[in-house]
Image (cartoon, rainbow, N blue to C red):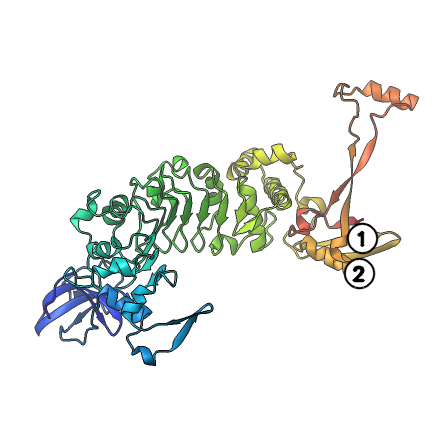
């Protein structure tokens, strides 16, 4: 057996690529320098004893080994032999077990019958032939049978095999007339020159392609073969390829979903390939993304087409990331964010710990166009709760400032402040808890609200943590009254009053102190009428502290009709 650089081999089901053939230092004989697909399998990265013999595609320090050529290498097999081995039996028909498709009896009795009975059994649509040591050779006499045997195949998985070139894969796939989805994960393919020229090698009907863990280069290889070999692509999956940047290239207009999870991106702008593309769904799980911009692009124009973004498991630790999305992704409707450090150590404007659920509320409030967060539909009530909670948090943060410059800086950190004030009215900026009653807002006493509940003739008082959500309070009251919690309505009697709204729409919206005096004297005016301000504590995950800022409160309990 002869060996060459780029050759694919397998040793006890462990796949590798030959990167070097020759001598090593003062050791006698010939050696193979191989890069393992399992990056933890080796002992070095191609440099041994201070000498660099070869360079691995992977950046792992343990991807490479030196091996003697005379190993018991796994035997490669043609495509049809692998297909027969997995999906058809070579046993004697008389000894083969009878199997059933629904109520129809079938006998899996060998390769010829397997091919003939495809149509009768509605064909084979999905083939999974990963880790089968497959190679394609042009001189194989059975190649012509591939099209007949696989004429109904729509999905093909050829992951982690012994292909050395994309041309081998093309030779197989070009014989599958209905092929729509192709998985090549884990292969180490060289790209022939004719694959980089439009129409030389082309599979225009393919819609989904997976090139995860292939270690192909983005700009020089993947982008070109996508444009030239797979021009009809709609979904591209390219996870775990050790990419730090996906430079700007022209992507097919039909490409709508791009999955680049498990790479090394640190900013959304590192995925410049999406700039001015037609990609609508961008999946970036398990990267190292912490910011939107990396300083190299005008991020305000980068992602106008994105409707769905998945950034789970990244390094996002600052709200500035989500604040920027309203500008960089104005069409964003669906977002997934779990597993980011931002949600682990949240604190409110008063310095109290916040839960992950509080963090999700603050995410919703920052993105007014969002329809779903972490696969959950955002209801109108949830958005109302989220936005009013966020607005109050900003107001509390402004309360803690000591100058207008500091207050302006707070408003600048919260770009939605003006829009939320316009929607709900600017909240009154009240003195801090320390100024009101001399109590440290971070003390345990400040985190407890003493609530007096009134239900008909019954009155009682409870000490309720301000971090408790309204669902918990309803449960507490329901248990006390022996009534199902969701049949109750809680109304906070604030003790404050608002003027009665005028019913005369044509009357001028102004007043004069002399008029009030005259009305008061005559007893017939209504300009001085006031109404008590009441606030419903709406059932939900919003906390007590986002409603009640003081230490004491009166809450009326009503039974819903």
Earlier along the polypeptide chain: callout 2 or callout 1?
Answer: 1
Q: Do the residues labelled 2 and 1 touch (CB within 8 Å)?
A: yes
Q: 392 or 247, which is in the foreground?
A: 247
Quarter of the rendering containing residue 410: top right
Which residue is found at the position 21% from the left and 55% from the top?
A: 171
**Label disc, if present, on residue 453 of the rendered structure:** 1
Residue 281: image location, x then y, percent: 42, 46
Other-residue count near label 2 (Cα within 10 Å), few / some / many at <14 / 14–19 / ≥20: few
- Real-space Cα distance between discs 2 and 1? 11 Å
Q: Which residue lies furthest to the right in this view?
A: 522
- In the rendered image, which residue does mark 2 sit on? 480
Residue 340 as seen in the image, left or right of residue 198? right
Mark 1, secondary structure of its residue: strand
Residue 387: image location, x then y, percent: 60, 42
Q: 295 or 67, which is in the foreground?
A: 67
Residue 179 as seen in the image, left or right of residue 280? left
Quarter of the rendering containing residue 398: top right
122, above or below 276, in the image: below
């Amino acid at each position: 057996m002869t060996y060459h650089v780029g050759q694919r081999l397998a040793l006890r089901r462990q796949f590798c690529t030959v990167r070097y053939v020759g001598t090593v230092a003062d050791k006698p004989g010939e050696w193979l320098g191989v890069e393992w697909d399992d990056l933890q399998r080796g002992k070095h990265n191609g440099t041994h004893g201070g000498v660099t013999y070869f360079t691995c595609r992977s950046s792992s320090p343990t991807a490479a080994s030196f091996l003697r050529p005379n190993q018991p290498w796994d035997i490669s097999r043609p495509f049809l032999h692998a297909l027969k081995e997995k999906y058809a039996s070579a046993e004697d028909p008389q000894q083969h077990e009878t199997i059933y498709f629904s109520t129809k009896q079938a006998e899996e009795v060998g390769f010829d019958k397997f091919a003939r009975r495809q149509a009768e059994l509605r064909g084979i649509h999905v083939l999974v032939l990963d880790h089968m040591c497959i190679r394609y050779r042009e001189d194989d006499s059975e190649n012509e049978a591939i099209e007949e045997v696989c004429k109904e195949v729509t999905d093909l998985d050829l992951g982690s095999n012994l292909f050395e070139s994309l041309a081998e894969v093309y030779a197989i796939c070009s014989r599958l007339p209905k092929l729509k989805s192709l998985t090549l994960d884990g292969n180490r393919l060289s790209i022939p020159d004719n694959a980089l020229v439009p129409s030389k090698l082309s599979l225009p009907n393919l819609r989904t392609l997976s090139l995860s863990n292939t270690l192909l280069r983005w700009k020089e290889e993947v982008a070109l073969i996508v444009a030239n070999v797979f021009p009809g692509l709609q979904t591209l999956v390219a996870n775990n390829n050790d990419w730090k940047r996906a430079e700007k290239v022209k992507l097919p207009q039909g490409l709508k979903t791009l999955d680049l999870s498990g790479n090394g991106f640190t900013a959304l702008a590192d995925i410049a390939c999406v700039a001015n593309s037609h990609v609508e769904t961008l999946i970036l799980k398990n990267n190292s993304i912490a910011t939107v911009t990396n300083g190299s692009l005008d991020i305000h124009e980068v992602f106008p087409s994105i409707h769905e973004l998945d950034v789970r498991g990244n390094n996002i630790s600052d709200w500035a990331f989500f604040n920027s999305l309203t500008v960089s992704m104005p069409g964003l409707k669906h977002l997934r964010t779990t597993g980011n450090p931002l949600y682990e150590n949240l604190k409110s404007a008063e310095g109290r710990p916040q839960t992950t659920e509080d963090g999700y509320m603050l995410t919703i409030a920052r993105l007014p166009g969002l329809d779903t967060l972490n696969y959950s539909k955002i209801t109108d009530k949830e958005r109302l709760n989220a936005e009013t909670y966020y607005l109050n948090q900003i107001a509390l943060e402004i309360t803690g400032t000591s100058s207008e410059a500091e207050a302006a800086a707070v408003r600048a950190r919260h770009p939605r402040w003006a829009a939320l004030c316009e929607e709900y009215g600017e909240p009154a900026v009240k003195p801090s808890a320390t100024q009101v009653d001399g109590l440290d807002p971070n003390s345990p006493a400040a985190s407890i609200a003493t609530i007096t509940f009134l239900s008909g003739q019954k009155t009682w008082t409870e000490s309720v943590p301000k971090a408790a959500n309204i669902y918990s309070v309803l449960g507490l009251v329901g248990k006390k009254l022996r009534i199902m919690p969701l049949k109750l309505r809680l109304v906070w009697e604030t003790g404050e009053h608002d003027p009665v709204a005028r019913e005369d729409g044509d009357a001028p919206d102004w007043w004069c102190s002399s008029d009030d005096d005259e009305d008061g004297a005559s007893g017939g005016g209504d300009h001085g009428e006031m109404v008590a301000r009441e606030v419903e504590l709406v059932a939900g995950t919003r906390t007590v502290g986002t409603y009640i800022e003081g230490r004491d409160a009166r809450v009326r309990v009503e039974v819903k009709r």
